[in-house]
């Protein structure tokens, strides 16, 4: 197990290096000049020259990259060109919001999607299967912003059970925090649940045709034991892969959902940084998201080994 983790971490180093090079290079292609925006309306040439020197924008591109990389390896991702705040501080303030929202959305998706997928596979080609597939396709097709608005109208405007927007941290109130995140988590979880349902169904149908499942049934094992212990455990491999990828996408930022519900999350921050040509923030956010994806892939590999003892050799 430790050898597997060590190999994956070693492979992550060139991946992160490549991601950092691509992000640093491609963002320079963005139109506009952040220094002109920072200099204000007067755009004093002396101020512009001083800002370019301060942020090393006069240096060659490779020099700028290695300067940024050297500080990044020390935990310093630079400062925002717009607010002058350290990028690590901005990330630390926004990431918990998106992380909590992602966890809640994934809980909804796993609970609904996997359960529906198992039922649909066991009742293949029945009315239950067809209904579940129809609901899943509807969940994938409905835009997040439209579903979010509908939920706001129902639960916030008409029923007045939940707030329509805003965010309350866990430090303020646990109950209020859950109330502010419940609707956006349902919006995100609905789409993810639909995707998980279809993959779980496909994996379960394939496993239920296997010889060892027929043998288990011939031995007289309870149907629930055959389905949950023998079939579902072996169908989990593709589901785990999909779950880690979906969770990584959520960490990248649920931009539309955060905009609809006015959540101060990761997605809104990176969109604002791109529009404001805030290079340091874009670099830091993409680097953190890349690290998140790599850690999730590592977690998936570890779960594979735990679920399938044959892979431990």
Image (tube, rainbow, N blue to C red):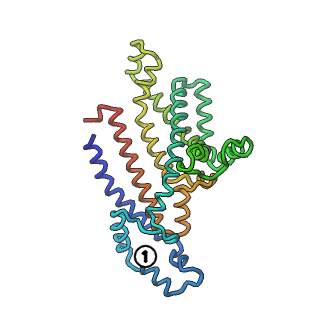
| Residue 31 relative to residue 71: left or right | right
| Residue 125 relative to residue 80: left or right | right
Q: Quadrant of residue 212?
A: top left
- As drawn, which residue projects farthest toward the front? 172
- Please determine whether, in this image, residue 304 is positioned above or below residue 125: below
Q: Position of residue 87 (x, y in %)?
A: 45, 64
Q: Residue at x 35, y 71 (%)?
A: 67
Front in this rendered view, residue 90 or 214: 90
Front in this rendered view, residue 137 or 283: 283
Front in this rendered view, residue 282 or 136: 282
Residue 140 seen in render? no
* Total marks placed: 1
Q: Position of residue 115 (x, y in %)?
A: 52, 30
Q: Residue at x 60, y 29 (%)?
A: 130
Residue wearing tag 1: 55
Dot 1 alpha-carbon crowd within 10 angstroms: few under 14, some 14 to 19, many 20 or more: some
- As drawn, which residue projects farthest toward the right? 158
Q: Residue at x 36, y 64 (%)?
A: 72
| Secondary element type, mark 1 | loop
The quarter in which the N terminus is drawn is: top left
Q: Position of residue 226 (x, y in %)?
A: 43, 20
Residue 255 seen in render? yes
The quarter in which the C terminus is drawn is: top left
- Please determine whether, in this image, residue 85 is positioned above or below residue 305: below
Front in this rendered view, residue 213 or 34: 34
Q: Position of residue 270 (x, y in %)?
A: 52, 61
């Amino acid at each position: 197990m430790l050898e597997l983790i060590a190999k994956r971490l070693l492979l992550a180093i060139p991946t992160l290096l490549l991601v950092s090079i691509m992000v640093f290079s491609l963002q320079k292609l963005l139109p506009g000049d952040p220094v002109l925006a920072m200099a204000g309306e007067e755009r004093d040439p002396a101020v512009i020259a001083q800002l370019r020197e301060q942020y090393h924008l006069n240096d060659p591109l490779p020099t700028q990259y290695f300067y940024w990389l050297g500080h990044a390896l020390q935990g310093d991702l630079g400062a925002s060109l717009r607010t002058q705040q350290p990028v690590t501080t901005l990330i630390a303030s926004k990431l918990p919001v998106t992380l909590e929202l992602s966890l809640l959305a994934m809980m909804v998706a796993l609970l609904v999607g996997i359960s529906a997928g198992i039922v649909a596979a066991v009742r293949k080609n029945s009315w239950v299967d067809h209904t579940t597939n129809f609901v899943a396709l509807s969940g994938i097709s409905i835009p997040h912003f439209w579903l979010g608005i509908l939920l706001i109208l129902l639960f916030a405007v008409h029923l007045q059970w939940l707030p329509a927007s805003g965010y309350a941290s866990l430090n303020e109130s646990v109950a209020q925090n859950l109330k502010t995140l419940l609707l956006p988590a349902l919006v995100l979880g609905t789409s993810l649940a639909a995707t998980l349902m279809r993959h779980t169904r496909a994996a379960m149908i394939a496993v239920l045709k296997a010889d060892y499942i027929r043998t288990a049934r011939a031995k007289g094992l309870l149907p629930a034991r055959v389905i949950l212990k023998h079939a579902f455990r072996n169908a989990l491999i593709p589901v785990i892969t999909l779950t880690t990828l979906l969770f990584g996408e959520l960490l990248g930022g649920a931009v539309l959902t955060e905009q609809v519900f006015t959540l101060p999350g990761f997605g809104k921050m990176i969109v604002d940084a791109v529009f404001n040509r805030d290079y340091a923030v874009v670099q830091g956010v993409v680097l953190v998201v890349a690290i998140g994806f790599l850690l999730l892939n590592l977690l998936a590999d570890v779960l594979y080994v735990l679920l399938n003892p044959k892979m431990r050799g």
